[in-house]
Amino acid sequence: MDASTVVGLSIQEARTLLDSRQVSAVELARASLERIARVEDRVRAFVSVTEDLALEQAHEADRRISEGRAAPLTGIPVQLKDNMATRGVKTTCSSRMLEDFVPTYDATVTRRLYDQDAVLLGKGNMDEFAMGSSTENSAFFPTRNPWDLDRVPGGSSGGPAAAVAASEAVFSLGSDTGGSIRQPAALCGVVGLKPTYGLVSRYGLVAFASSLDQIGPITRDVTDCAIVLNAIAGNDSRDSTSLNVDAKDYTDALASGEGSLKGLRIGVPTEYFVEGMEPEVEESTRRSIKLLESLGAEVAETSLPHTSFALSVYYILAPSECSANLARYDGVKYGFSDGEAESMWEALERTRGGGFGPEVKRRIMLGTYALSSGYYDAFYLKAQKVRTIIRREFERAFEEFDAIVSATSPTVAFALGEKTADPVRMYLSDVLTLPANIAGLPGMSVPAGTSEDGLPIGFQILAGPLKEETIFRIARAFEQASGWDGRGQGLPTVGHGTLVSPSP
Ligand code: GLN
């Protein structure tokens, strides 16, 4: 088996190959590592590649398969965003602050994947501390979009989305605070799910904004997404915000075929056709909505009038929480430390000044300001109140509708460097995704075609709390009917053409 064999492989397909012994987990791991070696100089989706660990785990997986005890992810090559703790493997958050940080424990999601003997290929590049929408805020290097190497993969989980799109990993896990799973999934033409807040444990996830952060799968198709959610969802006593819900088999919810969406009511909020949306994205979204109708869903326009406040609420709450969470990086406990100082205060200043990049500093300053006495009521408290209004608005909408759909991102992948000088323009990338975080709702981005330039466009499906099954039902039927199952559109063409050729 060589590297080309893993190109485009889904979890299910890999499972079949492994279980029928057409390929061993070690061969699959080797082919993935070879694929990484072949394309990584251009895509740069990995902060680190864990070759020895992968081969060791693959041996373990082969043993398990030969004993007839394979779990759904046994022997499947995975990447993890580099903000999830991996014992003995650097977890950098793409920050100088954690550049040499080697956790002594595994995140719960890591543990759950290891329990099934999944194979860790390495850690995914990201915007520093998950702050950003393009992966250009990584302290190390930007990741490139496999569909067009001059464009961004989105962010902050740009490494995970690019790694799956470029077939470096069969799947990855991302984290989503305001859109960081769904937006890069949309820009890279893969499937990304942000589960209900609290469905997946955050234990061992480096905190950004704890009331918004949520881990979820980034996969090639919808069925894979359900398989991965099965593995990582469920109560964890180590995370006090973890929900106490029974384990489910999300693959049961996958629907397909004509009429499969009969009885479902789907709302289309007018506010989600935002100003600045690219015409091709709008057209694609309207086409996608028509497709749902043709599958039997009842579609109606609706209004979520407070949508326009979501961005402001987010950019008060997320920085506020981040300013508190990132106070721990003081050069004393762990992480980067600049000890060349005369006094404690100078050491603190030098550590934080040199350890954090400009976007992280901007967020800490914004948050510290919003929480400071005299401004707390005007900013933080007010934002919390508007958060409640937004949440209630969704609650009412979900009395009427089973799901709400929209574009995932107002634009297709933009050029590297295009928005770095203008933070507010960059922040607008998440205008359609962050309301779900504010309300704690599940949301998925599924591929919905490409622009004329061959760049992927994503379609977002939102549902009420713990209604992931509704999303899976719609997403699978949509995927099947549209043919955009991560293969229907082919694999990355522009990038892919460049990717497989040995020359740069
Ligand atoms: N782009 C948003 C931000 O910069 C969302 C990030 C995320 O979801 N982690 O905060």
Image (cartoon, rainbow, N blue to C red):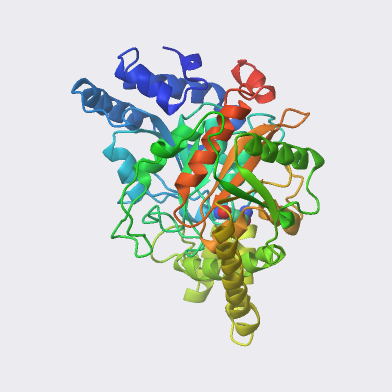
- Establish if 356 lies above or below 88: below
Q: In the displayed structure, does residue 105 sit left or right of residue 476?
A: left
The quarter of the displayed image where residue 287 is located: top right
* Mark count: 0
Task: State the quadrant of the C terminus.
Answer: top right
Q: Establish if 373 lies above or below 173.
A: below
Please state the horizontal and vertical placement of residue 244, each as a whole percent of the image: 32, 59
Q: Is residue 413 left or right of residue 360?
A: right
User: Which quadrant would the N terminus be assigned to in this image?
Assistant: top left
Q: Residue at x 64, y 78 (%)?
A: 379
Q: Position of residue 344 (x, y in %)?
A: 47, 75
* Depth order, front residue of 160/433: 433
Asked if residue 32 is positioned above or below residue 407 in the image, the reply reads above
Q: Residue at x 53, y 28 (%)?
A: 257
> Going by the picture, which residue comes out furthest to the left?
67
Evaluate whether residue 10 shows in this view. Answer: yes
Residue depicted at 34% across the width and 45% down the height: 248
Toward the viewer: 432 or 247?
247
Residue 185 placement: quadrant: top right
Q: Residue 92 or 249: which is nearer the viewer?
A: 249
